Image (cartoon, rainbow, N blue to C red):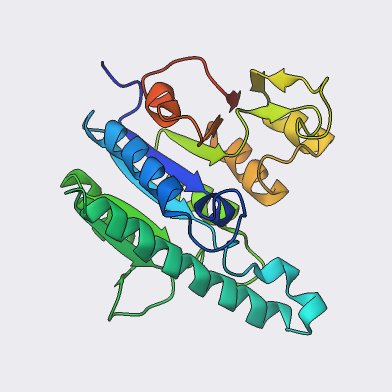
Amino acid sequence: MKPKYKRVLLKLSGEVLGGVNGFGFDYDVIGQITENVISVYQLNVEIGIVVGGGNIFRGGRSAPYRIDRVVGDHMGMLATVINSLCLQESLEQRGIKTRVMSAIEMHAIAEPYIKRRADRHLEKGRVVIFAAGTGNPFFTTDTAAVLRAKEISADVVIKATKTDGVYDKDPNLYSDAVRYSSLSYDTVLKKGLKVMDATAIAFCKDNHLPIVVVDIGSQSSIFNVVCGEDIGTIIS
């Protein structure tokens, strides 16, 4: 099949790596994510990945534990590095060349993020995993994902979640929840829909960067999006 997109940015939440429990590592789920990425890689699509750290630690929830928000956010950034190394190992065990690039320099385990170097890795067919968010506190990995996507000139941000799109209300709580097939940036912001944080959505609006929300639980969801199938919810 001919892919619709040449270069994509995949955004994964840390909780996804934790499976049903949402914390720690579910290696069956990680293996499934890996196979999903490989199916896209085999189409000669260039892939960047940003993964959160919520399965280990989330800085935005550090206040109840009397941890300063800045310190908490730095702890969360380090959690994303652990998750990035886990994804890297899973991909490389299956023969996919990868690079982890960190916004916080830690030369022993990851390359520092440099835009031109990231482009070169992608052009050489390596999957690039962007770790440590933006490197700054108070910014989520959602914002890091759309920022990196724009920097590397990705055609689309694919947000892989535990639901098959964006709903008007929580489908786990309401049986009459309705899934949107498409949304505008303004609608997402006005209705406060839980897609990405408002900063990330506003950034995508200003830079005309589309987002597609799909279910990571489906073995072919990312592949189908890349091939242009009408699944999930597109925000544009």
Judge by depth and name the residue closer to the eye, 84 or 111: 84
**Quarter of the C terminus within the rendering:** top right
Q: Residue 80 appears at what percent x and percent y?
A: 49, 65
Q: Quadrant of residue 3?
A: top left
Above or below: residue 29 compared with residue 65 = above
Direction from residue 63 to residue 234 in the image, left or right: left
Q: Residue at x 82, y 34 (%)?
A: 173
Direction from residue 103 to residue 203 in the image, left or right: right
Q: Quadrant of residue 57?
A: bottom right
Instruction: Kindly tell me whether residue 152 is visible in this rendering.
Output: no
Direction from residue 219 to residue 1 in the image, left or right: left
Above or below: residue 60 compared with residue 28 = below
Instruction: Kindly tell me whether residue 37 is visible in this rendering.
Output: yes
Q: Residue at x 61, y 55 (%)?
A: 22
Count of all numbered marks drawn on residues in the image: 0
Q: Residue 141 appears at what percent x and percent y?
A: 56, 57
Q: Residue 207 appears at what percent x and percent y?
A: 54, 39
Above or below: residue 206 compared with residue 51 = above
**Quarter of the N terminus within the rendering:** top left
